[in-house]
Amino acid sequence: MNPETKTCQNCKAGFTIEPEDFAFVFKTLRISRTFDLSKRIMVIEGVFMFHPQLLNDLWDKQIYLTGDIDKIDARRIKREQEKWGSDYFPETHPDSYFRQVTIALQRYIQQYKPEKVADLVLRVH
C-alpha cells in the first residue's frame, strides 16, 4: 500500500494515510495479505461494503443482510455486557465506539441505499 492523501468530508482538511497506519491491524488480527484468487467464489464481508465510489465495481454479486437495527443493537449490547462485565462502556457515553458506528451505519444506509444496489437482500431476525 502506498501513502494516500485524502480530504476530510467534514472539515475539508487534508490528511495522509500511511501504510503503517494499518500495520497494527495485520499484526493484531493476523490478517493474510494474500488471497488465493484461483477459487471460483470469494466472500468478502463488511458493514460498509456497498460504497458506490470505492467498491461497487469490484463485486460480481452483492448480498446485503438487513434487519431490525434496534433488535440487532440489543443483541450486540447484551454480548458486549457479558464480555466486559463491569468494564462495559455504555452506549450512552459520548465517546462510545459503538455509538459512533451506529450513527455512521444509519448515515450510510440513508446515503447509499445498499438494499437497492444489492443483487439479493436477506432479512435476519
Image: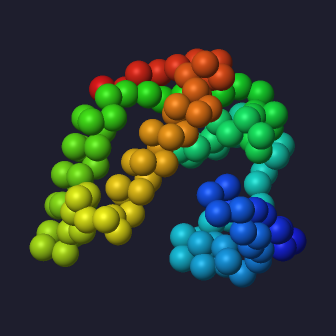
Rendering colour mode:
rainbow
- Which residue shows up at 72% across the image and 69% down it? 13
* On-image quarter of the N terminus: bottom right
Rendering quarter of residue 25? bottom right
* On-image quarter of the C terminus: top left
- Which residue shows up at 63% across the image and 41% down it? 49
- Which residue shows up at 23% across the image and 52% down it? 77
Residue 14 percent coordinates (x, y): 76, 70
Closer-to-camera residue (96/118):
96
Q: Count the numbered circles shown.
A: 0
Residue 71 percent coordinates (x, y): 25, 35
Side (left or right) of 55 relative to 22: right
Rendering quarter of residue 63? top right
Residue 68 percent coordinates (x, y): 32, 28
Residue 48 percent coordinates (x, y): 58, 44
Note whether residue 40 is visible: no
Closer-to-camera residue (104/44):
104
Question: Looking at the picture, does residue 59 appear above or below residue 100?
Answer: above
Residue extending furthest right? 2
Residue extending furthest front? 11
Note whether residue 67 is visible: yes
Question: Looking at the picture, does residue 21 appear above or below residue 71?
Answer: below
Side (left or right) of 62 relative to 80: right
Residue extending furthest left? 86
Rendering quarter of residue 108? top right
Question: Looking at the picture, does residue 41 appear above or below residue 102?
Answer: above
Question: Looking at the picture, does residue 118 appear above or below residue 89?
Answer: above
